[in-house]
Image: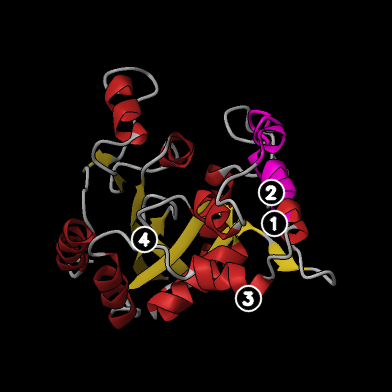
Amino acid sequence: MKKKVLVVFDFDHTLVDKNSDMWVIRCTPEQSLPAWLENSYQRGRWTEYMGRVFTYIGEQSVGPDAVRELMQTIPFTDGMIELLKFIYQNKSQIDCIIVSDSNTLFIDWILEAGGVTCAVDCVFSNPASVDQRGYIKVQGLHSHSCEHCPVNMCKQKVLRDFKARQVDTGVHYHTVCYVGDGTNDFCPMKALNEEDIAMPRTGYSLEKLLAKSRGKSTALKAQVIPWSSGTEILNQLKIIQQQAELF
């Protein structure tokens, strides 16, 4: 059984410093959406809403090449490029996955633009592609029974299933480092163990939610270490790496 470190990243407001689904709106002629479309969103059904947004963008004669060019201008969060390069340089010890409610097309394009695709072992996000009309289409990642997550994705299920598959291939993680910012990262963090680390972005909703849960039955087992830049996460990884040499 090979023991490694697993780093799990959210994407929007974590690896990148913006929300990719909001960033894409900049490619519309007015750089905004009509009210009827904005008002069509239903809670917990964001991916379905984005499907309508992509159809609207296609109807404005904005092709996938223009969308790709725009998406590749989204800024990475400070220090994240350097962090991902460090992870790539230490692939024998560190696995890295992205678990995001964005979509696979955006994430692939953006990682490519940053030159860091090779650092990421797997991307778990809503599958997206370009149809025959040249429109982007997106669908939910999976179905699940979690009452706390949107209908298209439960990040805890993604994490548990991934770890189980890795065990079947002979890989065990002595430490999981989960990096996120939003409330939808709370559910997977509840699956972390005492030897794991939950890293919420400073000043964002996840950090506030974790603070509220402290001392309650919903409190995490994992150590909580807030972060504000990729450099801080990199430093924490180096500490984990040193500790891992004891195994």
- Camera-side residue of 4 and 44: 44
Q: Which mark is residue 65?
A: 3
Relative height, residue 63 to residue 184 (above, below): below
**Residue bearing the label numbered 1:** 57
Identify the mark nearer the N-term, 2 or 3: 2
- First along the sequence among labels 2 and 4: 4
Number of callouts:
4
For the residues labelled 3 and 1, say whether their Cβ atoms are less than 8 Å apart. no
**What residue type is disc 4 on?**
Val
Mark 2 — residue? Answer: 53
Q: Nearer the viewer, residue 233 or 128?
A: 128
Q: Is residue 226 left or right of residue 120?
A: left
Which of the two discs, 2 and 4, sits closer to the camera? 2
* Residue depicted at x 69% and y 56%: 57
Q: Which residues are magenta?
A: 34-54
On the rendered image, what quadrant is the C terminus found in?
bottom left
Query: Residue furthest toward the top?
Result: 216
Relative to 129, residue 145 above or below: above
**SS label for mark 1:** helix
Query: Chief secondary structure of the magenta span?
Result: helix
CA–CA distance between discs 2 and 3? 17 Å
| Residue 77 percent location from the top left of the image | 30, 59
* Residue 14 disc label: none
Mark 4 lies on residue? 7
Give the class, few, some or many, for how many residues have Cα within 10 Å of label 1's Cα (few <14, many ≥20). Answer: many
Few, some or many residues within 10 Å of mark 2 (<14, 14–19, 20+): many
What residue do we see at 76% from left, 54% from top? 55
Tell me which residue sits at (63%, 36%) in the image. Answer: 150
Tell me if I can see residue 178 in this picture. Answer: yes
Q: Label 3 to label 4, Cα distance in Å?
A: 31 Å
The reply to whether residue 170 is in sight is no
Give me the residue at 43% from left, 68% from top.
Answer: 73
